[in-house]
């Protein structure tokens, strides 16, 4: 654990918070927040062929849900 002056690092705090969230939420939760995050950033694939933020958020939520299901 990385500490500075006896305090938890931001990285450690984020990791611990993510682990706690993963223990208390299901696949649907991650799919919903992934979709919401992406939707707030844009609804369609961009003209340059790159993935939209909505699609990236949705895919990220689905990937995390699959990872959680394997744990």
Image: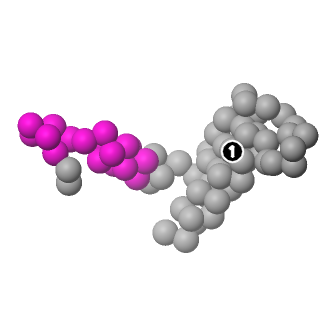
Position of 19 with respect to 6 (left or right) is right
Q: Position of residue 4 (x, y in %)?
A: 14, 40
Q: Position of residue 48 (x, y in %)?
A: 87, 44
- Residue at 53%, 48% in the rendered image: 25
Name the residue at the front extreme.
48
The quarter of the picture where residue 13 lies is: top left
Position of 28 with respect to 47 (left or right) is left
Is 8 rendered above or below residue 68?
above
Q: How is the image coloured?
A: one colour
The quarter of the picture where residue 17 lies is: top left
Is 58 rendered above or below residue 62?
above
Q: Mark 1 — residue?
A: 57
- Residue at 71%, 53% in the rendered image: 59
- Residue at 68%, 56% in the rendered image: 62
First to last magenta residue range = 3-19
- Is residue 7 among the parts visible in the rendering? yes
Q: Position of residue 37 (x, y in %)?
A: 67, 35
- Residue at 48%, 52% in the rendered image: 22
- Is 17 inside the magenta-drawn segment? yes
- Is 47 inside the magenta-drawn segment? no
């Amino acid at each position: 654990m990385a500490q500075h002056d006896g305090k938890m690092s931001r990285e450690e705090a984020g990791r611990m918070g993510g682990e706690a969230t993963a223990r208390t939420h299901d696949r649907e939760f991650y799919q919903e927040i992934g979709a919401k995050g992406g939707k707030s950033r844009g609804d369609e694939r961009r003209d340059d062929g790159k993935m939209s933020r909505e699609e990236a958020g949705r895919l990220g939520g689905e990937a995390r849900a699959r990872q959680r299901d394997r744990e």
